[in-house]
Amino acid sequence: MTAGIFRFFGRYLNPARWTGPIFDKELRISSRRKRNYWLRFAYLAAMTCFVVLVWNATVTLTGTSVYQVSRMSQAGVAIVASLVSFQFVIIQMIAVIMLSNAISGEINSRTLGILMTTPINSFQIVMGKLLSKLLQLILLLAISLPLLAVVRVFGGVPWDYVLSSVCITLTAVIFAGTLSMYFSISARPPYAIILKTIFVLGILYIFIPAMAGAILGRYYATRVGLSPAYYTCVFLTNPFIVMWASTTSMVSPAAFRQLPFSISIWPLHCGIMLAASSVVLARAVRVVRRVALAQAVGQVEGGFRQKPAAERKTSVAIKSQTIESEDRIRHVKGSPIVWKELRKPLIQGGRRNGIIGLSIAIGALLITYIVNMRNDLLTWNISHRMYALIFVVMGLVSNIVLSATAITSEKEARCWPILLTTAIDDWKIVAGKAIGMFYRCLPIWLFLAGHVILFVLIGWFHWIAIVQLAVMVVCMVAFITGSGIYFSTYFRRTTSAVVANTALALFLWAVVPSVLGMLQTNRNSDMLSAYITGNPFIQAVVITDATAGRQNAATSLRFLRYEWPEMRRRRQRIGDTTTILFSWLIIYVAGGAGLAWMAKRRLRKKVFYY
């Protein structure tokens, strides 16, 4: 009987039964890829540099020994809080990118249908893919644990915070990775899956909490009956707010007591996130089985679902009759690369899905306008600052991802050698791809343009903001497009090019300003103030703070004041600001042109290296 019990539990609780041979196969492949080792090295190097910089900014070697000991605890708190925030954001981004081609790679290589002819079931396929990628991310989390444990010796950091931060990060990574893997079943290009996942996470983590905060904040301020517990439940599914609450309770316990949050909510939050991941995972298992069976019988070819034979014949006959009746022949005008890129739809996924997605986005934006107008928030510049930052992030992310796919999409489709055998000049290829990337990112940037123009007409935005924000957008688009095309020629895969382009943007506009700020002295303060004026987020904040709002909109041009951070003359006039913006315009355009020239030189190198 005992042997039967052990045999039963050994059969159904064996991890190999849940993952199957897919997990073992993915681990063998991951162990042979150099990029995983480079990722761990870069992650550890970034953490080490981060600790050194925070230590240098917090601890001073001057003063008495008692003073230095007291600074040790503050340094420990600052280092732990910074490292936790760093890995919380970065590992989620890595999870979305790594799992963006988990299932679509099998579909595009036509091996998913073959797997269904083996004893491997759809649950083992999904779990094997998910756990193999999550293991690489768990290794990154494990790298930081010894450092957190050592820094905790300085004092001021309880073990509860270390445990809660790791659990919150892990559950958030699992949910983001599961969502990205679920979207990859549609067998779309990796960049489309990344953008779709970021869009959904933005709705869940930004739009819904912002609307709930605006509505419940006003309701909570006017009615005593709404308890803080109800206010807490609204944000219980948001890992960013829970992580912020946990960090605030550790850094400043007195300030945390004023907020309607409880530190004990993090176990419940982790349970909710795991339950949500399980729901997405169950849905992914069902969809994978359906797609795999369809591919096994020939209804899915290369990741795109085919119609039955009778419907295909009917649709082909109708299309041929339509073409013959209309006698339409599409003549190529101008550059064939530009013509081809402009023929692509602005929104991927079909006309119907594009219209539905655009309608939902516009409807959600109008809802935010209505809620903020009822609270009388749109007459102040701080509300327009938040809108501008959101739109800039949306446009920047789409530009980073799409520009990095300009050449890699041709390589993955195996048509890049064919394109190079034509008589098209290399510069025309690069310029055509750049124009196509701007055209495909245009719907995202139109949100920022529409917001500014709308409130200029209403009278809550100064008209000069249209010119200044346009210069800022041109700076970002020119540089990011050039870097994306260069990385697209350098790497074989879209995922690698997207990661490199994202890392460049983070390095220039997040890492370097942070390093200069931590190492700030009287000698390099001028260098820091000059460098951060080229940060597009700083530019968006400075421009909206000076031109947004009812009062600023009614101000004359010569009385507008732009407050640039770290400037000796904090209040800058419009002439100084215009000079700063156009100076960075020249720098960014020159940088983008230089990267495009480097991409042009690499076009014909390693053509057949896939």
Image: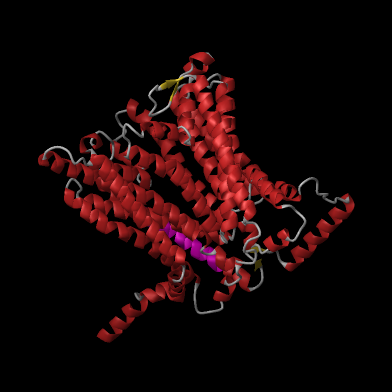
Mark yes or no: residue 413 visible: yes
The x and y percentages for residue 345 are 68, 47
Query: Which quarter of the picture shows residue 585?
Result: top right
**Coloring scheme of the render?**
secondary structure
Q: Nearer the viewer, residue 503 or 17?
A: 503
Mark yes or no: residue 406 visible: no
Q: Which residues are magenta?
A: 272-290
Quarter containing the C terminus: bottom right
The x and y percentages for residue 437 are 63, 46
Q: Nearer the viewer, residue 579 or 349?
A: 579
Asked if residue 356 is positioned above or below residue 10 in the image, the reply reads: above
The x and y percentages for residue 448 are 56, 33
Residue at 56% over, 53% down? 487
The mark tally for this picture is 0
Examine the residues drawn in magenta and state their main secondary structure: helix
Q: Nearer the viewer, residue 63 or 432?
A: 63
Horizontal relation, residue 63 to residue 477: left or right: left
Residue at 58% over, 75% down? 114
Residue at 66% over, 68% down? 299
Q: Is residue 282 magenta?
A: yes
Horizontal relation, residue 511 to residue 250: left or right: right
Q: Is residue 374 magenta?
A: no
The x and y percentages for residue 601 are 63, 54
Quarter containing the N terminus: bottom left
The furthest residue to the front:
523
Residue at 74% over, 68% down? 309
